[in-house]
């Protein structure tokens, strides 16, 4: 979705709502209203939530809940967000970008909802976010903020440092999402394992990840079904699609930028389970 104005966004979301409605009317999805699991698909923005959405739209019993992606930032009031979390029904999944919040976890557990948290190499997340702000959604305040800087290096530094009320410092965002990766109640998976060979990943890791997800939410699929689903997970049709591949930062950044970024967020990279 390349949005130059609010009308572009409106057209996209209207089209998506229609797709969600008709998908939810399929036989298996109707059955899911009685026996399907409740699931939240969470990630830090630009971590590849579209991959999880693509997967879940292919699973039996599952349907999109019809709500916009839930954003929960702990510096703001979360009461209305907790209401959304408690409203998820059987057979529904909700997309979210929730920073860790104890009340959110308690609400999710109380509603007997499963939560899957997707992580991605922080360096690829940063590059993807920069591209999104600059080229795909020019309606954001952050677009004007980053336009004040001439070079990519300066823009990356600005994203690391942030700007009050416009762009939260990237290291702080990483810290606020990290606790989700350390909880027994949460299934944490890697973008790099889910994307598969079409996005530069490994087919067997993709298959194993899909099996792990299905086992976690108690949905049974045979090997042929899993193989068919895996072949359709990676799509350039995502509304926020860029290149979406593994290790893109290595190809995009020059030597100086790579060294600076690795030094600047070294601890964050390691804490998310990635190598320098």
Image (cartoon, grey):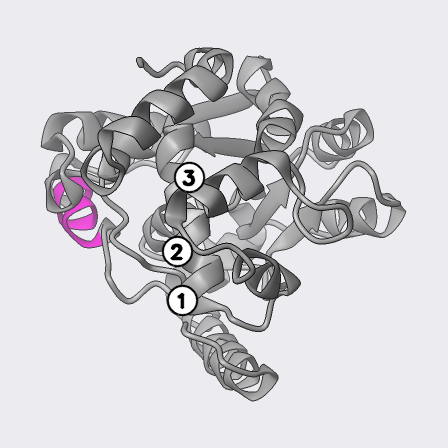
Provide the residue designation for mark 1.
Answer: 135
Provide the residue designation for mark 2.
Answer: 131
- As helix, strand or loop, the secondary structure at mark 1 comes to helix
Q: Residue at x 58, y 43 (%)?
A: 38
Q: Examine the residues drawn in magenta and state their main secondary structure.
A: helix
Provide the residue designation for mark 3.
Answer: 125
Instruction: Tell me if residue 74 can be seen.
Output: yes
Q: CA distance from mark 3 to mark 2?
A: 10 Å
Q: Position of residue 198 (x, y in %)?
A: 12, 46
Relative horizontal placement of residue 158, taking residue 61 as reference (left or right): right
Q: Position of residue 69 (x, y in %)?
A: 59, 56
Q: CA distance from mark 1 to mark 2?
A: 6 Å
Instruction: Tell me if residue 41 can be seen.
Output: no
Q: Residue 272: within the magenta?
A: no
Tell me the mark number nearer the camera, choosing from 3 and 2. Answer: 2
- What is the magenta range? 226-232
Q: Residue at x 44, y 56 (%)?
A: 150
Q: Residue at x 19, y 44 (%)?
A: 230
Q: Residue at x 50, y 84 (%)?
A: 8
Residue contact between numbered discs 1 and 2, judged by CB atoms under 8 Å: yes
């Amino acid at each position: 979705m390349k949005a130059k104005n609010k009308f572009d966004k409106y057209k996209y979301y209207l089209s998506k709502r229609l797709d969600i409605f008709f998908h939810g009317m399929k036989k298996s999805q109707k059955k899911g209203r009685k026996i399907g699991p409740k699931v939240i698909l969470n990630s830090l923005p630009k971590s590849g939530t579209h991959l999880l959405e693509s997967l879940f739209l292919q699973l039996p019993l599952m349907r999109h809940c019809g709500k916009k992606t839930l954003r929960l930032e702990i510096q703001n009031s979360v009461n209305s967000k907790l209401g959304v979390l408690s409203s998820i029904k059987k057979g529904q999944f909700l997309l979210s970008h929730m920073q860790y919040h104890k009340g959110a976890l308690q609400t999710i557990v109380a509603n007997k909802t499963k939560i899957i948290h997707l992580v991605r190499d922080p360096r690829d997340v940063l590059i993807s976010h920069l591209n999104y702000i600059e080229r795909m959604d020019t309606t954001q305040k952050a677009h004007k903020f980053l336009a004040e800087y001439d070079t990519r290096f300066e823009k990356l530094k600005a994203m690391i440092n942030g700007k009050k009320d416009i762009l939260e410092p990237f290291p702080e965002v990483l810290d606020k999402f990290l606790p989700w990766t350390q909880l027994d109640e949460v299934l944490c998976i890697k973008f790099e394992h889910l994307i598969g060979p079409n996005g530069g990943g490994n087919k067997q890791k993709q298959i194993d990840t899909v099996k792990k997800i299905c086992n976690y939410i108690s949905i049974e699929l045979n090997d042929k079904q899993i193989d068919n689903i895996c072949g359709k997970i990676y799509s350039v049709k995502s509304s926020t699609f860029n290149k979406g591949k593994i290790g893109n930062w290595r190809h995009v950044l020059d030597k100086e930028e790579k060294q600076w970024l690795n030094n600047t967020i070294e601890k964050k990279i390691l804490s998310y389970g990635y190598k320098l």
